[in-house]
């Protein structure tokens, strides 16, 4: 392996320490802690694990977390009603709807029920538009984490070719927009892309955001490229063929310990920001 690892776990720990300082300060000034509500619909075991990790980490950094578990049979209207109530609740600073939600629910309608000032996971259209225009607002948590990781390792973004594999509203599209806002030349690839290998071979930065184990072969990686693997598949395997890619890349994220911890760090950092904003607005 010749690549340097991009250590998301360490950067996340640094961010958690800063958040803990921030929450203590807010408690001293405003007499309250930031409050994050996580909403989970159904019984997906991985989603339960993710929510537990977020709740545990919230407690460690001084963020009050409340958890709402809804049954699998919850309708879109019922979920929207819960999210609207939380949006109106002045004691709540951030709302996280754990996704994916069960297939019968209109996920977009549910996301849009979250007030943008509490959209600390960056899933609403408003947050997406602000991010795309480079305006202040909440980033999609995983893309925001990827950007912080790239910045920590001083990866030059302006003028370089970035290839994003995946175009989901919470991951592929927003990381592409963040890179575009930083002057990368961005190509999106997806399930209908016919020449994935060629596109990746051309990339100075590869962002893998698919959810298919080892889809991106190591020998596609341009020597000296930066490889960020957001994919997380059964058996702790990413979307990139790690060992082979690491012999060619300059920088590469491990799975786990790369992008995953940064997602939680951004979520909680943005919850602190939301609480500060609400306090300044007298809410
Ligand atoms: P998603 O909504 O299922 O989107 C997957 C994307 O991959 C789609 O845009 C799809 O294209 C594309 N795709 C599927 N097969 C492909 C192929 N053969 N070649 C090229 N593109 C292909 O998934 P997601 O929510 O974005 O998540 C993607 C991965 O990231 C998953 O492994 C997930 O677990 C992981 N993830 C990690 C974190 C974290 O915190 N580390 C957070 C979120 C997600 P179409 O649009 O054409 O269907």
Image (cartoon, helix red, strand yellow):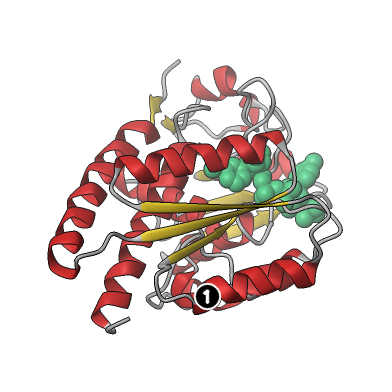
Provide residue 148's location: percent of width, then percent of height: 36, 50
**Nearer the observer, 186 or 10:** 10
Tag count: 1
**Nearer the observer, 169 or 99:** 99
Provide residue 24's location: percent of width, then percent of height: 18, 54
Provide residue 36's location: percent of width, then percent of height: 43, 58
Look at mark 1 in the image and give the residue it sits on.
Answer: 87
Residue at 69% x, 34% y: name it.
45
Please tell me whether mark 1 sits on a helix, a strand or a loop: helix
- The reply to whether residue 147 is visible in this rendering is no
Q: Residue furthest bottom?
A: 281
72 left or right, relative to 99:
right
Q: Quadrant of residue 158?
A: bottom left
Residue at 69% x, 25% y: name it.
234
Name the quarter where the N terminus is drawn. top left
**Nearer the observer, 82 or 9:** 82
């Amino acid at each position: 392996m010749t690549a340097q690892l991009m250590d998301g776990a360490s950067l996340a720990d640094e961010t958690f320490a800063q958040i803990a300082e921030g929450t203590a300060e807010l408690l001293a000034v405003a007499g309250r802690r930031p409050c994050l509500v996580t909403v989970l619909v159904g019984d997906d075991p991985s989603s339960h694990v993710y929510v537990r990790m977020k709740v545990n980490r919230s407690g460690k950094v001084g963020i009050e977390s409340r958890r709402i578990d809804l049954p699998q049979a919850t309708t879109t209207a019922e979920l929207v009603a819960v999210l609207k109530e939380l949006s109106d609740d002045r004691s709540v600073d951030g709302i996280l709807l754990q996704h994916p939600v069960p297939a019968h629910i209109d996920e977009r309608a549910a996301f849009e029920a979250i007030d943008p000032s509490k959209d600390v996971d960056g899933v609403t259209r408003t947050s997406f538009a602000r991010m795309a225009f480079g305006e202040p607002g909440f980033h999609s948590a995983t893309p925001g984490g990827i950007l912080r990781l790239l910045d920590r390792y001083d990866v030059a973004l302006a003028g370089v070719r970035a290839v994003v594999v995946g175009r989901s509203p919470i991951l592929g599209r927003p990381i592409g927009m963040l890179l575009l806002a930083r002057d990368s030349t961005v190509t999106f690839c997806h399930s209908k892309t016919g020449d994935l290998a060629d596109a990746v071979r051309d990339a100075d930065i590869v962002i893998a955001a698919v959810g298919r184990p080892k889809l991106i072969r190591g020998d596609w990686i341009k020597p000296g490229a930066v490889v960020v693997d957001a994919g997380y598949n059964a058996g702790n395997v990413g979307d990139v063929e790690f060992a082979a890619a690491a012999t060619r890349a300059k920088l590469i994220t491990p799975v786990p310990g790369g992008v995953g911890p940064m997602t939680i760090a951004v979520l909680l950092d943005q919850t602190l920001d939301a609480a500060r904003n609400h306090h300044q607005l007298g809410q």
